[in-house]
Amino acid sequence: MAAGKIGRVPQQQTPIKVLYLAMAEYFSESGLYWRPLGGNNIDQISGHCYQYTDIKSLKSGLKATTIVVDLGKFDNHQALGIKNSVAAVPDIRELLKTPFLEPEAIFLTHSHPDHLNGIVHYLKAGYSLPPLYGGKYTMMILNELYDEFCVMPYERPDFNIIDDGDVIKCGSFKIEVLASSHTCFDSFGLLITAHDGTTVYHTGDMKTDNSTYFRKPTNLKRLAQMSGKVDFTVCDFCGIVRDGLAVREVDTFKKLVQIIKKSRKNKIFIPVYPTHAEMYLIAFLAALKQKKDVIFYGGKDFYSYLEQIKNYGLDFEKLAGNRIKVYVGTPPEIKKLKGKFAVIGTYNDIGNHFNESSSDSLGIITSGTFFNPLRGQFNARNIRFVDTKDYPVLQGYGHGFLGDYEKINQILAKPLFIPTHCPIYVIDSCRKLAEYIGIKIATPTAQNNHTYKLEKDGFKEVKASPATWLVVSYANNQAAFTEVWQKPTSGMGFLKRTFSARRCRNQFEMMLHQRQNKDNRNADK
Ligand SMILES: [Zn+2]
C-alpha cells in the first residue's frame, strides 16, 4: 500500500527523554493548557478527546497535572484507507508515554461511542489507562464493551462513579460535575478549575432543555451561581447551525401523542436509534398515553440497549401499570394481538410479525438519515408514515442550538467560548453572527493537536502539531494501531452526508440577516 497516498505517518521511536524536553519548551510556564485531540476535526464530527494540563511552579520545579476528557472513536474510519479497520481513535500515546504529562484521570462525559469507545481499543492494544470517572450508565455501557471485546477484569482501569454536584480533587485541578441534558442517562458537564483559579465549563454534549422524563436536566441553577466566575466554555457546537432553542423532550412527546391520536390507526411503528435512550421512553410514554400496548421489537443492538435501560432502573411494566401490556420480542401472544399496539423498535427493520396493512398501520420516523432503510420498507408495504420532514420536532435532539448558547452566554456573563464537537469551518463561519449577538469566540480557531494556553484574560496558541488518528485493526483478539494524518473524509466511507462548508456559511449568513432584520423592525417600532 502506498503510504504517502493515505497519509500514513512514518513510525518513529522517540525516546521519552527527548519528548520530555520538547514538552518543556512550551510547558515551561505555569498555567492551564488545553488541547483538542479529536473533536475539532476538519469535517466529520466524532472521535472526541480533550487534554487539560495544569502546570504549577514549585520550588522543586514544575509540576503538571493532566486530565483527559473523553476518549471516543472516529466513526468514518473506513475513509482513512487502512484495510480491515474497525475503528479509529484519537492519539493520546504521547501523554501515556511521557511521565511529566501522564494523565491522572480520564473523565467520560457520557456513554456515546464517539466519547467512550476509544477506551476499549487502547486497552486491547496493550496500554494501561489511568482511573476513569463517569456516570453509572456510562459504566454499564463500558462494561458491556469490555465483555464484547474480551477485556479481562484485571485489564480494566478503576472506574469511579460520578454524579451531579460531585467535586473531585485531581492533582492541582478541582473538578465539579454538572448534570447535562442529552439523549442518554448520566450525561455530564464539568467545571474545571486550575490552581490559579482559571475556570472552564466543559459542557459535554448538551442542550439547556429542562423538560425531562428520565434524567437530571442541565444544572442551570449551579451555572447561575457560577456567573462571572467561568472564564472559558469549552462548548458543544454540534447544533449551532440552527437558530432558537433545541427541541424539548416535552414537545417531541406531545407531537407523538397528537400524531398517534389523529391517525386513528391501530398499529403504530416507532423506530428508535439504539443509543438514544430518550426516545425509547418518550415513544413508550406516548403509546401509554394513547392506551396502546407496547411491543419492543428489534435487532441485537436494540435489545442490548433496552436491557441496559431496564438495568439502569427504568421499569416499563411498572409505568404501564394495568393500563397497557408490554411485550419484548415476538412471544406467541403477539400473533393473537388484534387490538391497538405500538411497535417500538430497531431503526431499519420492522420484521414480519405484526400483520400490518395500509388500512390499520402508521409509521413514525423520528430521525433524519438513520431510518432510510425503513422508509423503503414502509413504502414497499404501502404503509403511510410521517417524517421529521413533516414535523421536525419528532427528532429528539441532544445538542443545543444557537439559542441554548445564547442562554449559557447570558447565565455565565459572557465567558470566552471555545467551540468543539463540530468541523472547524463551522467555527470560522459562525464568528460574524456570534459577534453580532455578543458571544465571544476564542481566536484562533481551535484545531486538533494544537495546544492552547488558557489565561484569565486570553487564549493563546502555544504549539501547532499535525493531527493524527490511530486506525484500529484486530488480529488474534489484539488491537494494532496505524497512525494516519487527519484529513477530510466527507463523501467517503459510510458517512457520505456531511454539512458542507459552503452550506454552513450560507446558513450563518441567513441567520445573521434574520437577526439584523428583526432588530431593525424592533428599532422602528
Ligand atoms: Zn452524545
Image (spheres, rainbow, N blue to C red):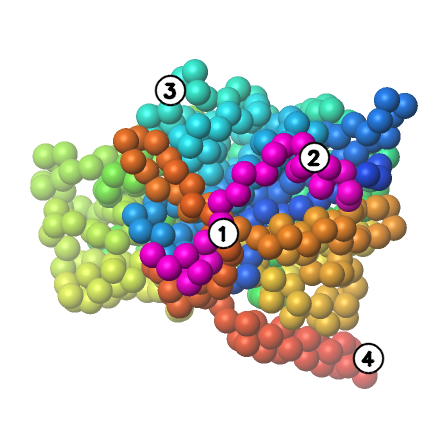
How packed mark 4 is, by other alpha carbons closer than 10 Å (few <14, some 14-19, many 20 or more), is few
In percent of the image, x 77 and y 44: which residue is there? Answer: 26
Kind of residue at badge 3: Met
Mark 2 or 3, nearer chain start: 2
Question: Which residue lies at the image location 58% right of the left edge and 31% below the top edge?
Answer: 96
Q: Which residue is mark 4?
A: 523
Secondary structure beneath label 1:
loop
Q: Amino acid at mark 4?
A: Ala
Amino acid type for the residue under numbered disc 2: Tyr
Q: Is the CB of mark 2 within 8 Å of ligand 1?
A: no
Of circles 1 and 3, which is in front?
1
Residue placed under numbered mark 3 in the picture? 152
| Mark 2 crowd level (few <14, some 14–19, many ≥20, 10 Å Cα) | some
Label 2 with label 3: CB-CB less than 8 Å: no
Q: Residue at x 79, y 64 (%)?
A: 438
Foreground of the two, 9 or 264: 9
* Distance of label 2 from label 1 (alpha carbons): 21 Å
Q: Which residue is mark 1?
A: 9
Q: Give the magenta range.
A: 1-27
Q: Earlier in the sequence, mark 4 or mark 1?
A: 1
Mark 1 or mark 3: whose residue is earlier in sequence: 1
- Name which of mark 2 and mark 1 comes first in the sequence: 1
Q: Quadrant of residue 245?
A: bottom right
- Residue 22 placement (x, y as % from top left): 71, 41
Q: Nearer the viewer, mark 2 or mark 3?
A: 2
| Alpha carbon separation for disc pair 1 and 3 | 31 Å
Residue position for label 2: 20
| SS label for mark 3 | loop
Marks 4 and 3 in Cβ contact (< 8 Å): no
